[in-house]
Image (cartoon, rainbow, N blue to C red):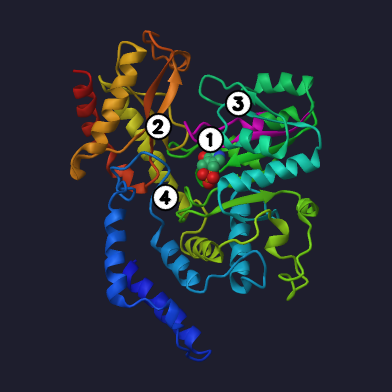
Amino acid sequence: MDLRAWADRAVAEIGAWQRAFGEFAPHPDAVVPDEEFGPAFAELLDRLRGTYPFHHPRYLGQLIKPPHPAAVVGYLAAMLLNPNNHALDGGPATTGLEREAVDRLAAMLGMPGALGHLTGSGTIANLESLYVARETRPGAAIAHSADAHYTHARMCHLLGVRSVPIPVDAVGRIDVAALDSLLGEQDVGTVVLTAGTTGLGAVDPIHEVLELRRRHDFRIHVDAACGGFFALIADDAPDGVAAAPFRAIAECDSVVVDPHKHGLQPYGCGAVLFADPAVERYYRHESPWTYFTSAEPHLGEISLECSRSGAAAAALWLTLRVLPPTPDGLGRVLRAGRRAALGWAELLADSAVLSAYQRPELDVLGIVPAAPGMAALDERTQRVLHGGMRAEPGEAVHLAAMEVTAADLARRGHRLRADVPTARVLRSVLLKPEHEHWIRRCHTDLEALARRAAE
Ligand SMILES: *Cc1c(COP(=O)(O)O)cnc(C)c1O
C-alpha cells in the first residue's frame, strides 16, 4: 500500500463530499497562513524525532508499533469528518462500522451475539467489565492473579469493590488450587483471568477455572487485552499457541481485547464484550439531547464513556476488512511473531551470556543476562538495556526491563546468589511479523552487548 497515495485520496474524496453541501469561507480568526504553519510544523516534526523507532524490527521493547496503513487511511478518512460514536446522531455511519467490527471480534473470541463496543483503552474496557461484575454480584469480591494488570486492583478500588490477588504458579499463571480454596472460603462474585499477562504473556488456564464452576458459583471475566488476537492461532500447532484456554473464553461472562495492541490499530482502541446482552440494563440512562434520531439502542447507551472516536471504529473496520480476524488473515501476522519468539528462545538456549527467563507462551520473551548474583544481574540488565538503546541506529536493540525476585528466578531454574532481593531482567515483545527475519541479528547484537556488560 502506498500510504501517501491513499491518504491523498482520503483527503480529496472526503473534501469533495463536504464541498457538495456548498462552499463557504473559513472564518478568518481560525485561518493560519502557510508561512506561519510551516515553521510550527517543522518544529513538531523535529520534536517527534525524539521518539524510539517503534516501526523497526530492532525495536522489541513494549507493545508499541505504528498502525497498519489500512488503519491510518481509515482513521484519516473518518477523522476528517470526526464522527462521535456515543450516539447514532453523532456517528450515523461509523456506528454501523463499529457494530460490524465488534461482531468480528466477538466471533474471533467465540462469543457470537455478545453485547459489546469499542472503548478508549483496555483499562476502560476492563473498568466496564468490573463495573458490570459489581452490579451483577453486589457486595462480593473480585479475584485476579497477582500478575494481572495493575489496573484491576486500581479499578476495583475506584469501584469500591474488594479485590483479592491470587498467587501465580511457576510460569506466572493463576494458581488454580489457591483460587479453589479462596472460592470455598470467601464470597467471590467474579474471577478475572488473564489471557496473556503484560509482563510475561502467561495465559491463565481458563479451561481449568471453568471446571471450578461445578462446585462454586462465580462469574469469569477474561482480560485478553494483550493476548486476545492469539485466539486466531490457538491450535496447538508448533507455531501456534495452546488451544484449550482460548477455546474456554466462549464459556466466560465477559472479555476484553485491545485492537491497539495486536490488532494493528492506533491508540484509542480497546473493546469489551459481554456474553449476556441483558447486562445492558446496568448502563441505562436518559440523554434527550443526543439520542433523538432512532429508537434503536445507541452505543452510548451501552458504554460508560460518552464521546468516542468514530474514526477508531472506521480504522478497525477497514483493517479487518482487508486482514480479517481469521487464521488465514490476521492469524498469519500473529503466527510470524510467535515464530520469532520461539526462534529467539532457541537461540538463547545455546547462548553463554543470555538465557530465556521462561519458555514464551505468546510473543513475549524474558531474557536473563548471565550473572553470578542478583546485584550483578541488575547492573548487567541495565547496561545491556541502555547500550542497546544508545547504539547507532543500524545496531540498536531496543528492549524493556522487568523486576523479578530471586525466588521468581529460582522457580525457573536460574540459580544465582540472592545478594539483593530483586533484580531487573530484559523483556521483549515480538509484536511485528518482521521480527521473524531479524531475531538472529538482534540476538547477535544483544550477545555482544551482554559480553561487554559482563566485563
Ligand atoms: C495493556 C493491558 C491492559 C491495559 O490496557 P490499555 O489499553 O493499556 O489501557 C490491561 N490488561 C492487560 C493484560 C494488558 O496487557
Disc 1 under 8 Å from ligand 1? The reply is no
- Disc nearest the viewer among 1 and 4: 4
Residue 230 visible in this rendered orientation of the protein: no
Query: As shown in the figure, which amino acid type bears the numbered disc 1?
Result: Ala
In the image, which disc is placed on residue 365? 2
Mark number, residue 174:
3
Say which label, 3 or 2, has the lower sequence index.
Answer: 3
**Residue kind at label 4, given as amino acid type:** Val
The answer to which of marks 1 and 2 sits earlier in the sequence is 1
Q: At which x and y percent is residue 349?
A: 32, 23
Residue 333, numbered label: 4
Tag count: 4
The location of residue 368, given as percent across then percent down, is 34, 23
Nearest-to-viewer mark from 3 and 1:
3
What's the CA distance linking mark 1 and mark 2? Answer: 16 Å
Label 3 crowd bin: few (<14), some (14–19), many (20+), radius 10 Å = many
Judging by the rendered image, the residue that carries numbered circle 1 is 242
Q: CA distance from mark 4 to mark 3?
A: 28 Å
Q: Secondary structure at mark 1?
A: loop
Q: Earlier in the sequence, mark 2 or mark 4?
A: 4
Residue at 69% x, 61% y is 300
Q: Earlier in the sequence, mark 4 or mark 3?
A: 3
Image quarter in which the C terminus is found = top left
The x and y percentages for residue 433 are: 36, 47
Residue 104 appears in the picture as rendered: yes
| Mark 1 vs 2: CB contact within 8 A | no
Number of the front mark, 2 or 4: 2
SS of the residue at dot 4?
helix
The answer to whether marks 2 and 4 mark residues whose Cβ atoms lie closer than 8 Å is: no
Query: Eyeballing the image, is 141 above or below 38?
Result: above
